[in-house]
Image (cartoon, rainbow, N blue to C red):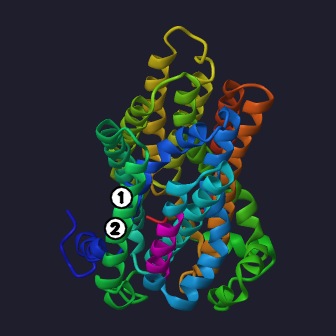
């Protein structure tokens, strides 16, 4: 058992709790309460199933578009200010959600929330990449993913309870706003993460992925690599194009499958004619299973390697989506919906923290912000494309075809992880 030293997992994670995990949990609980209701509200505003999927995709499109300005903001103002200001802007987005009288206004408000969520995500990722020792990096980042999953678990149940009490989706949106106010207060008045845990508090040792990146781009591995952050996101993308085009593409497929899960589960329920409360409960149960496995994912990655978490996750989610696509018109469609939502929860739980960990593993060790901006832009692009793909295929063919296509993406991603993880993230212990 690891001793409780100043650099032990327990001590470092306890120090991170009020600075990183607390704000993450509050934000995720509020977001988790609202996400299952986005297609429902869009339906109430007059959208059909395909258009509701398009509106729901505005959340991940916002996250994609927010990565580059978020990277600039983190480098310029630091994690604390970036997270606090993003929280304030989210409140403006929630006002738009409550008072939206048209689908265009509602979609713009959802986009704004996703845009600010990118600032939260990039600030936390950059902070922990430079401060968490390698030997428990996956567990620390899986715990970060786990706090988000906790929100996805608790939020939909709170939403279902509020719907039962008030009978109006507005109550869930107001609950998100209350969570945001608490997040803003914790960020601005809690411990300053940049002072409490300075850069270099964690080990800069990492797997040899960067050498692979440099070789692929024709750049020698030298001490100049940490200065890439000053070159900007797009130049960094070019410099590390080899790993981004290979391992990054596999990671983008995992992001796509995760994002599709968030959209498909409520959308599938709407297409079956289920009420909002039932949909919220099914999504919540899936989130509970997801949440229960998050730390196990980190343990597996730290002990056995990154591939042992990524591959089972992709295989399970691929199989779950493909199987679900054949159940829409069955007499027991609601039962299959609940069952495969649980399967997808298991697969997603096994992947907790894998994108964060892989990004941290292959980022330059001292100034990772620009590379992580590139990495997150690519992975979020996968997340943004998947709901758009589901929407397009639903409009052209059917929702079953759209869901089956997501399963095919998962299979493609599994092959990519098998090929590229051993090359860019070799075992070091």
The quadrant of the image that shows the C terminus is: bottom left
Residue lying at 45% horizontally and 28% vertically, measured from the top left:
275
- 27 or 14, which lies in front? 27
Asked which secondary structure carries label 2, the reply is helix
Asked if disc 2 and disc 1 are in contact, CB closer than 8 Å, the reply is: yes
Residue 328 pos. (x, y %): 60, 18
- 215 or 33, which lies in front? 33
Residue at the disc numbered 2: 21
Asked if 337 appears above or below 158 in the picture, the reply is above
Asked which secondary structure carries label 1, the reply is helix
Instruction: Tell me where residue 21 sits by quadrant.
Output: bottom left
The circle on residue 360 is none
Q: Earlier in the sequence, mark 2 or mark 1?
A: 2
Residue 216 pos. (x, y %): 77, 70
- Magenta segment, which residues? 82-93
Instruction: Tell me where residue 421 sits by quadrant.
Output: bottom right
Residue lying at 37% horizontally and 53% vertically, measured from the top left:
151
Residue 325 pos. (x, y %): 62, 23
- 168 or 289, which lies in front? 168
Q: Does residue 73 appear in the picture of this structure? A: yes
């Amino acid at each position: 058992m690891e001793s409780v030293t100043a650099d032990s997992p327990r001590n470092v994670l306890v120090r991170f709790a009020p600075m990183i995990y607390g704000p993450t949990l509050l934000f995720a609980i509020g977001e988790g309460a609202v996400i299952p209701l986005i297609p429902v509200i869009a339906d109430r505003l007059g959208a059909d199933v395909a258009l509701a999927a398009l509106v729901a995709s505005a959340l991940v499109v916002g996250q994609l578009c927010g990565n580059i300005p978020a990277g600039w903001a983190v480098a310029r103002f630091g994690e604390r200010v970036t997270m606090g200001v993003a929280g304030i802007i989210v409140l403006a987005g929630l006002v738009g959600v409550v008072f939206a009288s048209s689908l265009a206004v509602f979609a713009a408000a959802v986009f704004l929330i996703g845009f600010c969520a990118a600032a939260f995500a990039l600030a936390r990722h950059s902070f922990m990449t430079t401060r968490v020792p390698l030997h428990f990096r996956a567990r620390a980042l899986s715990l970060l993913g786990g706090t988000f999953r906790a929100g996805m678990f608790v939020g939909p149940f709170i939403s279902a309870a509020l719907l039962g009490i008030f009978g109006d989706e507005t109550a869930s949106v107001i609950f998100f706003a209350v969570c945001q106010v608490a997040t803003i207060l914790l960020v601005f008045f809690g411990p300053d993460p940049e002072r409490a845990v300075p850069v270099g508090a964690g080990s800069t040792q990492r797997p040899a992925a960067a050498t692979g990146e440099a070789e692929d781009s024709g750049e020698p591995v030298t001490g100049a690599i940490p200065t890439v952050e000053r070159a900007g996101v797009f130049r960094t993308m070019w410099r590390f194009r080899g790993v981004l085009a290979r391992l990054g593409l596999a990671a983008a497929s995992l992001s796509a499958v995760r994002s599709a899960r968030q959209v498909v589960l409520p959308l599938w329920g709407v297409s079956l004619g289920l009420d909002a409360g039932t949909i919220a409960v099914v999504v919540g149960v899936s989130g509970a299973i997801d949440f229960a496995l998050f730390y196990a994912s980190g343990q597996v990655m730290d002990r056995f390697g990154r591939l042992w978490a990524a591959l089972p996750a992709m295989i399970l989610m691929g199989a779950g989506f493909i199987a679900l696509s054949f159940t829409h018109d069955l007499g027991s469609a609601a039962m299959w919906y609940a069952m495969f939502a649980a399967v997808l929860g298991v697969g997603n739980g096994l992947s907790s923290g894998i994108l964060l960990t892989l990004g941290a593993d292959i980022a330059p060790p001292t100034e990772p912000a620009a590379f992580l901006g590139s990495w997150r832009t690519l992975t979020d692009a996968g997340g943004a494309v998947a709901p758009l793909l589901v929407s397009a295929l639903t409009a052209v063919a059917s929702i079953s075809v759209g869901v089956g296509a997501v399963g095919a993406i998962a299979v493609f991603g599994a092959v990519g992880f098998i090929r590229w993880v051993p090359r860019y993230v070799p075992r070091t212990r």
